Amino acid sequence: MIAYVAALLLAASAAGPAAAAASQPLTTTYVQLRGSLTVSWSGDPSDGCAAQGVCGVTGSLQMVPTSTSGESSSSPEPSLPPLELTDEAAVARVVQTAAGGSTPAACADVVPVDFDLAVSSRDGTLRATVNRIESFELPSSGRCAGPTQADMVALTLPARRLHDGYDLSGQATFRAGPFAVAVTSTVRALVSDRPPAGPATVLVAGAGSRVTVVAPPPGRSELLENAQLTYRVTSIRGGLSQSFTALAAPLCEPLGACGTGGELSESFSGGGVFGFSGTRVVTRRVGKRAALADLAAGRLNLEALQQAASFPSTVRETLIEPGGTTCTDAASQPASLSGAGTRHGRTVTLSLSPSGLLQGPSGAVDPLRTRCPGPSRADVLGPQGGALATATLPASDLGRRRLTLTFQHPGAFQGSAYDGQRGGSVVLTLRLTGTSGGTARLEVPGS
């Protein structure tokens, strides 16, 4: 089914409030992708595939775009909508042949993709590259052996301007660790001011329509008590681990994982600044000391606010196959510290989570996938993903000059093809660097 997405961009008028309230014409531009995009890979001896046990690996992922994107603007020259490539049914297919030439193992995994390509000119040559900020799910080999989502940031396509859009067809190559990757595209981006034929729900009016900006209803003023503590992460110790084995047949068969097992381990480094804050509506003003005391007593709605805490993380995988062949690989990406307080502010739960290369609602690049076969984040942490590890802090500890947080996520897990055990712990030490608090007048918009 073709989905249509239209984003409304209204520019503020420089002519003053009277002009801002006037009707403004809108034009809508649609982009539809046609064709297919195929990514294939194979272990390359010149890039060390033997040392990582993946020389016998060959695989591919074919994507057929199924979405149309649209953008409405009052600008006389609206910008090109994103070239969004979506395929929820894409499947990675991988064959791995052992060095002795034994019967090859086949792996197939569903790998939904949803990412944006941005066309730009460099040295007079048009290229379509991955838009990291707007991409949700990049291509990868899924749970099979092959490139990860982080590797696919390097995906680049040639682009040529056509009278009705862009031609992104052609071939490209790049390296992904021990794999040589080839990209074959027949994709064309068709640009029009009319939606393509077929069922559609357009979320904004099309060309020539008009909208009126209406002044919001009056709001109200409230008195807000607030307190904030700023801590600096001074040390990170320990690590997390997951041991896993493939489920019994037939559950292991689609991924070609029968008889395999191994271990994942994550280590963290770095530091940064992290803040805890709390608020509540009050009827009288209080000073800084009283606000900080209320925060520690659990009288404020407690929140944890990340400011600059960032932790480079590395996941290392060792996978052993039935014949004794071992695949090893490591992947790195940022992790971050985030948190949420309880309603009454008595505790705050902190999460150590991947921040990844992508900023979409999917959360991030999968923090547990390497270029070896193995379990995904959904296998280890559940279908909704979740944090790598959590720590709980009582509000009464807030304000101490030094905090020690122990992050853990122990327990058994079972995914669609692997089960195993989570273990390990990560210990963060935080030092208090600043405090603020008091009461402020808050203007609440009307509804």
Image (cartoon, grey):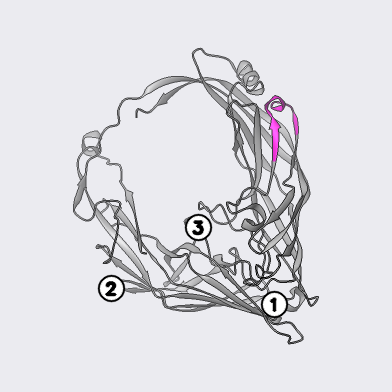
Q: Which residue is mark 1?
A: 47
| Range drawn in magenta | 391-403
Residue appearing at x 66%, y 64% in the figure? 417
Question: Quick one: 67 or 444, which is closer to the camera?
Answer: 67
User: What's the amino acid at mark 3?
Assistant: Phe
User: What's the amino acid at mark 1?
Assistant: Asp
Sequence order check, earlier mark of 1 and 3: 1
Total numbered circles: 3
Sequence order check, earlier mark of 2 and 3: 3
Q: Image quadrant of residue 258?
A: bottom right
> Would residue 359 appear left or right of 296 to someone viewing this image?
left
How far apart are the alpha carbons under marks 1 and 2? 42 Å
Sequence order check, earlier mark of 1 and 2: 1
Which corner quadrant holds the N terminus?
bottom left
Q: Against 78, is 325 above or below?
A: below
Question: Quick one: 66 or 331, which is closer to the camera?
Answer: 66
Which corner quadrant holds the C terminus?
top left
Q: Which residue is mark 3?
A: 136
Q: Which residue is mark 2?
A: 163
Q: Image quadrant of residue 200?
A: bottom left
Magenta segment includes 393? yes
Could you say where residue 332 lies in the image, as x and y percent from the top left?
67, 59
User: What's the amino acid at mark 2?
Assistant: His
Residue appearing at x 71%, y 48% in the figure? 270
How far apart are the alpha carbons under marks 2 and 3? 30 Å
Give the label, 2 or 3, closer to the camera. 3
